[in-house]
Image (cartoon, grey):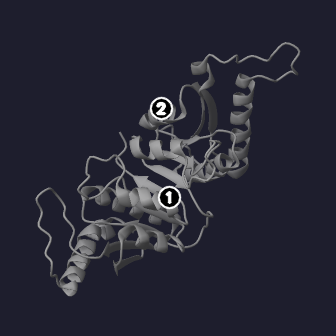
Amino acid sequence: MTIHSADPVVVGVDGSATALDAVRVAAREAAFRHRPLRVVHAFIWPLTRAPLTPAPGAPAGAGLRNQAERCVAEAVAEAGKVAPDVPVTGVVVDGAPAAVLVEESRRATLMVLGHRGLGGFAGLLIGSVTLQVSARAHCPVLVTRGEARADGPVVVGVDGSAHSGVAVGFAYEEAARRGAPLVVVHAWLYPTPIGPGDIVPLVYDPEALAEESRRILAEAVAGWSERYPDVEVRQRSVRGAPARVLVEQSASAQLVVVGAHGRGALAGLLLGSVSHAVLHHAHAPLVIARHAG
C-alpha cells in the first residue's frame, strides 16, 4: 500500500470505549484513502491549573499527563491492529476538546469522532464535543453511530441546495471507494418557506410536489454518473419528514451522508435541523459533508 503524505484522517480520543470504536473506523478510513492517521487527545487540565505530575508517593506512571499519554498510546496500538500498513501518529494537545479538534480539522481530509464520550451526561444521544465539532469543522466529519457494516448502500439526502450538492459528490466518491450502491433520497411533505416573506399555499397538488422531488433528484445526480460510471445509483422520492426518512433509510446503510445545512429559513445555523436530527438518531455511521478548508 502506498501512503501519501497528504492531509491525514484525524480521530479524537478521550479514553472511552466509544472513542476506541472511532479509532477502528478511522484506521479503516485512512486505509481506504491511502492517508496517514493522526490520533489526537485534547488535554484540558492545564487550563484548570490542576497538578499534572504524580503526587508524592504515587506509583510510577500516575498523574494526569501520563494518563493522557496512555490514552493516546492505547488508541495508536488499536489502530495498528486494524490497519497495520497505515502510518499512525498520536499527540496530546493542550486545550479544550472542541477547540482543539476544530483546529485539527483545518489540516485534515476527514475528522472521525465517537457519538459519545466520557462526559457526565451519558443519557444524551450525542456528545457535546461531537456536536460542536460537527457544526464547526473545516473538513467532513464522520460520526460513528450504530454498528459498522461492510454491506448495504451509501445513502445521501438531497434538497436542491448547494450544501446537498457537496454531500452528493462526497457520497459518490464513498460509494465508488467501497464498491457499494448509492441511494439518493429526497423527502417531501408539503410546500415550506425557503426565505422571509415566502407565501405558502393553503392548497397544493401532491403530484406536482412529487414531480418537483423527482426533478431535484435528477439534478442532484446530473453529471456524477459520468465521473463514477461503476456506481449503481438508486433515486428515491419519499413522502415524509426529511429527518425521519433519512433515519429510516439509515437502518440498512453502511454510511449516511448529509450536507452541513440545507435550504431552511435558519440558514445561518452552522448545522441544519435535518443534519442535527439525523446526527442524533441515525442507525449507521454518518458523515457531515462540507468542503475542506
- Of label 1 and label 2, which has the lower sequence position? 2
Q: Nearer the viewer, mark 1 or mark 2?
A: 1
Above or below, 240 relative to 126: below
Q: Is residue 173 left or right of residue 87?
A: left
Above or below, 240 relative to 228: below
The total number of labels drawn is 2
Q: Is residue 230 left or right of residue 11?
A: left
Query: How far across and down, in percent of the image, does residue 114 sit?
Result: 59, 49
What amino acid is at disc 2? Answer: Ala
Q: Badge 2, how many Cα within 10 Å: few under 14, some, many 20+?
A: some
Separation of residues labelled 1 and 2 (CA atoms): 21 Å
Secondary element at tag 1:
helix
Q: Residue at x 20, y 77 (%)?
A: 212
Q: Residue at x 56, y 44 (%)?
A: 3
Q: Contact, CB < 8 Å: mark 1 with mark 2? A: no
Residue lying farthest to the front in this orientation: 202
Above or below, 248 relative to 38: below
Q: Residue at x 46, y 66 (%)?
A: 175
Q: Return the residue at label 2.
A: 99
What amino acid is at disc 1? Answer: His
Q: Is residue 230 left or right of residue 43?
A: left
Which quarter of the rendered picture does the C terminus lie within? Answer: top left
In this orientation, which residue lies closer to the viewer: 230 or 245?
245
In this orientation, which residue lies closer to the viewer: 274 or 148?
274
Q: Is residue 230 visible?
A: no
Query: How far across and down, in percent of the image, does residue 208 sit?
Result: 18, 83
Query: How far across and down, in percent of the image, does residue 232 sit?
Result: 42, 76
Q: Return the residue at label 1.
A: 280
